[in-house]
Image (cartoon, rainbow, N blue to C red):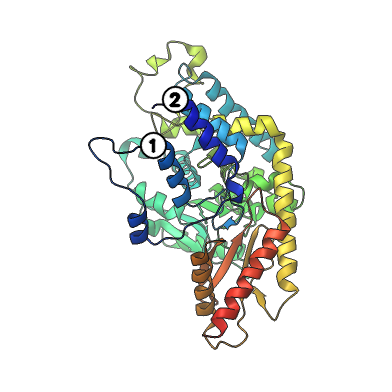
Amino acid sequence: MKNLKEHFLKTLDIALKLKEKPLTSALPPHKLIESFDICLEENPSVESAIDTIEKIISYSVNTQNPRFLNQLNGGSTQESWLGELLVSILNTSMATFEIAPLATLMEKEIISQLGKKIGFDHCEGLMAPGGSYANMLGLHCARQFYNPSIKKQGNNKQFHIYVSEDAHYSSEKALNLMGMGTKSLIKVKTDETHKMSLSELKKAIEASKRSHITPLCVVSTAGTTVWGAFDPLEGISEICQKEGLWHHVDAAWGGLAIWSEKAPSLFKGLHLAQSIALDFHKLMASSLTKGMFITSKKGILQQANSGGGGEYIFHNHDDKDKASFDTGTYALQCGRRVNSLPVWLQWKLNGAEGYKKQAHKMFTLAKFTQNFIQKSPEKYKLLLEPEYMNICFQVLPTQSSMPLGEFNSRMREELLSRGHFMVNYAKDKQHGAFFRLVLSQWGLTEDIIKELFAELELIKNKLDKT
Ligand code: ABU
């Protein structure tokens, strides 16, 4: 590329101002196709790379704008941008120590620090391309632990895996991929605070045993995607210990708040689990996607995932010193992205103190938002007292007789089309559609939250008349 330095500097200049730039053009697909030259041609037709870069930025969703509150991830720290730049330039893979020496040590250091914080006696793991993948590794390790012969013989036994009815859909996907069948997933009822009910879990395990199906694993959630609910980890671990089951915790959304002392009860018993999935790109605003799988079970990742490559890439570990540093022998992939570097750099530059501050800030903003909503019961209905950073609420119409769920669905459509804010919604049988406001944006402030509610007020007034 010509003028590389100029392009980098210009792009950086744009990037540094993104917090103040528009959030989204909110164009539907056909309008976007009309507005942007998407076609790829045999010969280049682009006059100026910078024009193209500027257009890419302006027609993409600008998640650096702190009004992007749509997903569990939002924005990313400048430290992680630096890390990403290095990853692209160094352009190596995590397969062996010899090609990724520092990145391997960085990954091990992150895992070791996490293990200490959680309270694991022993800790090993891998960075994974997201929480779903890390959850799949949890199920894979559980199966390997209880039935190592499956690795060679294939799966011919039916197991049951238990999740709460509010759990993320990744366990279902993993069971499909692992050939265990989605019918192996048992959705356990939650209580009125959306936490897995321990008595219902016990009943479900008993029912499996009565049907001669082997209970294998409980996947509990530390921070559900919609409600931000934390399952009772300690109680679930006790049941797992008694029944001899693997306990995996999907802590992709909630796990890294462990640095804050604001809600220690949420993490009680986390150290008793056999494996945990965490995502640095959610609450901690690393660049996407920085999933992490950690386990306290020594050697299980290598037992479950190793296979092949001995002759040509791992060289049968002729160098015994390096053997345990060749992470490709305990990953499922051969080439694996160097995701440790941006996370390590962010941690190195901000310290664990940075994580603590972020978690504190979001807990405080969640309380502020809760109070803001509860101060105006004639305007808003808070659907669950938040214990984490998910605020689920509905806007109440003044005049409209539209069903509440439908009214809120229309509100959200209008909010999106205005392009100033993005806040997601969910639906359930009890409420219909409602707003799921999630707080993880580093740049978020009380003023921006007030601005959101002022915008919702405007939209409500408009819709109320229709
Ligand atoms: N595991 C990704 C969750 C995405 C979201 O709820 O925003």
- Amino acid identity at mark 1: Ser
Q: Secondary structure at mark 2?
A: loop
Q: Residue at x 51, y 65 (%)?
A: 416
Q: If you read the primary sequence from the N terminus, does the residue marked by circle 1 or circle 2 appear first?
A: 1
Q: Is mark 2 within 8 Å of ligand 1?
A: no
Q: Amino acid at mark 2?
A: Asn
* SS at circle 1: loop
Crowding at dot 1, Cα within 10 Å, few <14 / some 14-19 / many 20+, comes out as: few
Q: Nearer the viewer, residue 258 or 376?
A: 376
Label 1, ligand 1: CB separation under 8 Å: no
Q: Which residue is mark 2?
A: 91
Instruction: Locate residue 212, reporting x and y percent.
Output: 41, 58
The quarter of the picture where the N terminus appears is: top left
Q: Is residue 297 visible?
A: no
**Residue 8, position in %: x, y?**
50, 31
Vertical order, 334 against 271 (above or below): above
Q: Are marks 1 and 2 in contact (CB under 8 Å)?
A: no
Residue 21 at x, y = what percent?
A: 57, 51
Q: Position of residue 55 (x, y in %)?
A: 43, 46
Give the Cα separation between the discs numbered 1 and 2. Answer: 26 Å
The residue labelled by disc 1 is: 48
Picture mark count: 2
Res 30 seen here: yes
Q: Is residue 408 above or below residue 225?
A: below
Q: Is residue 28 left or right of residue 120?
A: left
